[in-house]
Image (cartoon, rainbow, N blue to C red):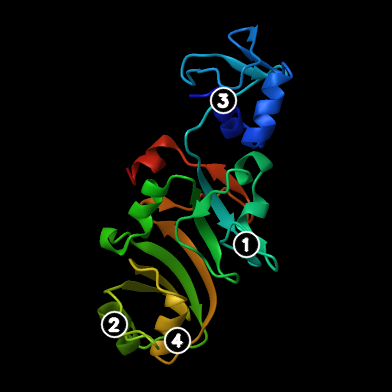
Amino acid sequence: MRLDRFISKCTTMGRAESTKKVRQGNITVNDKTITNPQTKISPDTDSIYFNDKKLVYKEFIYIMLNKPMGYICSTKDDKNRTVLDLLPEEYAAREPFSCGRLDIDTTGLVLLTDNGKWSHKITSPKKKCFKTYIVTSHEPLTKEDMTQLEEGVMLDNDDKITLPAIIKELEDCKYELQICEGRFHQVKRMFEAVGNVVVALHRSSIGEIILDLELDSGKHRELTAEEISYFK
């Protein structure tokens, strides 16, 4: 790997700034100052420092975020705050994308990565990755409503019914719903299809990855190797 690319991957600097820092003599490789940005290095074996700080290379990043209300799952937006605003600069600079979006007023688990192949195994309908939501509704669901949601409902402006879902009542007007699709506003539209309204929505898991209960709203952590492996 070229030294300038390595630096841009490990820091918030772009390729041009990384090249400049190398030429200025700010980088050492194995205790030797290197000024050629095209120098080939090995991220696994070489020891690389920038201004006395060791740089650690990560080919991809994998982040768990507990999304609060008021943020959208986009990398850029002129009007709204995005989930990247909740991340440190070294993560946000890589512009990771969310593996399945949540609405601005929906809270809970968001997975962020810059690995497209890994994300595809979560978002592709063919993979049938179930996501679990805690849904608070305006009115209680009847048994018939719950059966209908499990068997599939026709959403407005769609040409086919939803795939089978799993729903469990937690308490009055509060339900655990598992679905393996990601249609636009799907959970809200499913409840509308049975004559109800969602008043609060929270995602608690994606596949085998469960939202860390120690993560306060707006906080994040990197996924463990085991969690990453669920979708490899």
Q: Is residue 171 in view?
A: no
How dense is the environment of label 2, judged by Cα within 10 Å: few (below 14), some, or many (20 and up)? some
Cα distance between the residues tagged 1 and 3: 30 Å
Residue annotated with mark 4: 140
- Mark whose residue sits in front, 1 or 4: 1
Q: Give the residue type at disc 1.
A: Pro
Outermost residue toward the bottom? Answer: 195
Residue at which label 1 appears: 68
Residue sitting at x 63%, y 66%:
69
Q: Secondary structure at mark 4?
A: loop
Determine the CA span between mark 2 and mark 3.
47 Å
What separation in Å lies between label 4 and label 3 (alpha carbons)? 52 Å
**Marks 1 and 4, how far apart in space?**
25 Å
Near mark 4 (Cα within 10 A), the count class, few <14, some 14-19 or many ≥20, is some
Quarter occupied by residue 175 = bottom left
Is 14 rendered above or below residue 33? Answer: below
Q: Nearer the viewer, mark 1 or mark 3?
A: 3
Q: Label 2 belongs to which residue?
A: 161
Q: Say which of 151 and 163 sits in front.
A: 163
Which callout, 2 or 4, points at the residue further toward the start of the chain?
4
- In this rendering, the count of numbered labels is 4
Q: Is residue 160 toward the left or the right of residue 177 in the image?
A: left
Query: Residue 112, relative to residue 176: is it above or below?
Result: above
